[in-house]
């Protein structure tokens, strides 16, 4: 049961295509498993469609249509290969680096993304803290396995955390299985041990 | 070509923008004609309406005239190639083409192209059987959003338009409009609430 969702403004930026890639990957991971957000997204995309209709047309070259029809038999580009079987889309086809130990009970696997945000997978043993939120700009975390809790609630598989303000309580992985999350941020580097890890691997 | 009528056009105004807007049912019929018969006349009609608007959208997003036209071409080529995946129960014609254009632009901004990885075109991810009432609902969605957009206060329509057209993150909208970030976000929220009300239980 998914109970934590992205904010309206984050979903709007995603629908408009203006979220930096790493954040968009985290948002897409949540949306892929969340029927509610798929429907919210469809409505926002319909806003995009209505706005597209309303634009004043730009002028095209005279032969634009003919040049396009000359390509009518081209096949559409293939999807990139599945690189990470076992992860939900779109993470299954996204280039990921290797796992790095970051302190005790936590590992980090960066994802290769372009743009003004960085991200990766983080695996935290039960009872261990996830790196604290930097709160500079937007930060999104989607739980893939296990669960964590912070001052704002309990986050299980499919839940998306979008902190709105500083919480004193760092997120801590719940008892049971290790907590696997995909996380992205456009803010400063993370504080604490992950920050050291980030510097070590040159993020 | 039987059954194909020229799109009906009416003048509407969306927050200061006036445009010739055809009934979206007709565009859906054109896409289906392409899917069923590789109908080049239908495609030409769709191209004449959408290609200049997709180019205009790309120009607003900061693309050069050459790149904007190239992206419009790639968008329309994808429309041709994927017409069979268009599902009027999932999205209106303008919405579907908007998402294709958006994804083309996202891909173009990457050094290494991963076509379709991040934001699959809606038709690429079937959701299982669609209820008949949803087919009706989606057919009405664009029309209802169009009406709701026309009724939005100008300042709310403005932040939505900037978010969709100009690839502005909220901080940039803040700078440009000279209003605090909190105000940008609250205007977006107000606008989205109104749109959601207009959509009723569709979302």
Image (cartoon, rainbow, N blue to C red):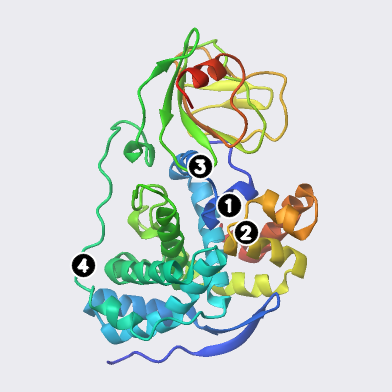
- Are discs 1 and 3 both within one chain? yes
User: Between marks 2 and 1, how big is the CA–CA gap?
Assistant: 7 Å
Give the image quarter of residue B50: bottom left
Q: State the image coordinates of residue B16 (x, y, percent, origin top left).
A: 70, 78
Observer-side mark, 1 or 3, equals 1
Give me the C-alpha separation between circle 4 and circle 2. 33 Å
Kindly identify which numbered label has been placed on residue A13.
1
Density class for disc 1 (Cα within 10 Å; few <14, some 14-19, many ≥20) is many
Compared to residue A57, the image places residue B80 above or below, namely above
Q: Position of residue B66 (x, y in %)?
A: 43, 70
Disc 3 is attached to a residue of which chain? A
Whether label 2 touches label 1, CB < 8 Å: yes
Q: Which residue is label 2 attached to?
A: B163
Give the quarter of the image for residue B27.
bottom left
Q: Residues within 10 Å of mark 4 (few under 14, many from 20)?
A: few
Q: Position of residue B28 (x, y in %)?
A: 40, 76
Left/right of residue A160 with respect to residue A168 in the rendered view: left
A107 vs B43: above or below: above
Residue A27's disc number: 3
Seen as rendered, the residue at the extreme left is: A73
CA–CA distance in space, label 1 to label 4: 32 Å
- The C terminus of chain B lies in quadrant: bottom right
In front here: A51 or B137? A51
């Amino acid at each position: 049961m998914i109970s934590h969702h992205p904010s309206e403004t984050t979903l709007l930026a995603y629908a408009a295509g203006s979220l930096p890639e790493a954040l968009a990957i985290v948002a897409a991971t949540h949306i892929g498993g969340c029927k509610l957000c798929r429907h919210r997204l469809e409505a926002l995309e319909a806003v995009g469609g209505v706005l597209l209709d309303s634009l004043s047309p730009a002028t095209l070259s005279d032969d634009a249509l003919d040049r396009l029809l000359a390509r009518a038999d081209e096949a559409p580009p293939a999807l990139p290969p599945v690189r990470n079987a076992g992860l939900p889309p779109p993470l299954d086809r996204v280039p990921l680096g290797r796992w790095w130990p970051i302190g005790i009970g936590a590992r980090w696997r960066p994802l290769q993304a372009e743009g003004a945000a960085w991200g990766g997978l983080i695996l935290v043993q039960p009872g261990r803290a996830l790196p604290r939120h930097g709160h500079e700009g937007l930060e999104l975390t989607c739980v893939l396995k296990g669960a964590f809790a912070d001052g704002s609630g309990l986050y299980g598989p499919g839940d998306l955390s979008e902190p709105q303000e500083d919480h004193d309580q760092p997120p801590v992985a719940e008892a049971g299985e290790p907590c696997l999350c995909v996380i992205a941020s456009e803010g400063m580097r993370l504080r604490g041990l992950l920050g050291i890890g980030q510097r070590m691997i040159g993020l | 070509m039987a059954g194909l009528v020229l799109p009906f056009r009416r003048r509407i105004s969306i927050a200061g923008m006036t445009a010739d807007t055809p009934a979206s049912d007709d565009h859906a019929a054109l896409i289906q004609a392409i899917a069923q018969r590789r109908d080049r006349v239908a495609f030409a009609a769709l191209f004449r309406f959408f290609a200049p608007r997709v180019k205009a959208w790309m120009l607003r997003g900061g693309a050069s005239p050459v790149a904007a036209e190239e992206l419009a071409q790639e968008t329309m080529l994808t429309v041709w190639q994927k017409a069979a995946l268009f599902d009027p129960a999932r999205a209106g014609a303008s919405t579907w083409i908007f998402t294709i254009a958006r994804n083309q632009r996202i891909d173009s901004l990457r050094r290494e192209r991963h076509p379709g990885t991040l934001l699959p075109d809606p038709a690429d991810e079937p959701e299982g059987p669609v209820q008949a009432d949803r087919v009706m609902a989606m057919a009405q969605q664009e029309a209802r959003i169009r009406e709701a957009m026309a009724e939005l206060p100008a300042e709310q329509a403005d932040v939505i338009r900037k978010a969709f057209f100009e690839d502005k993150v909220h901080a940039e909208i803040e700078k440009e409009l000279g209003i605090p970030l909190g105000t940008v976000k609250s205007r977006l929220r107000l606008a989205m609430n109104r749109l959601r009300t207009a959509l009723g239980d569709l979302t």
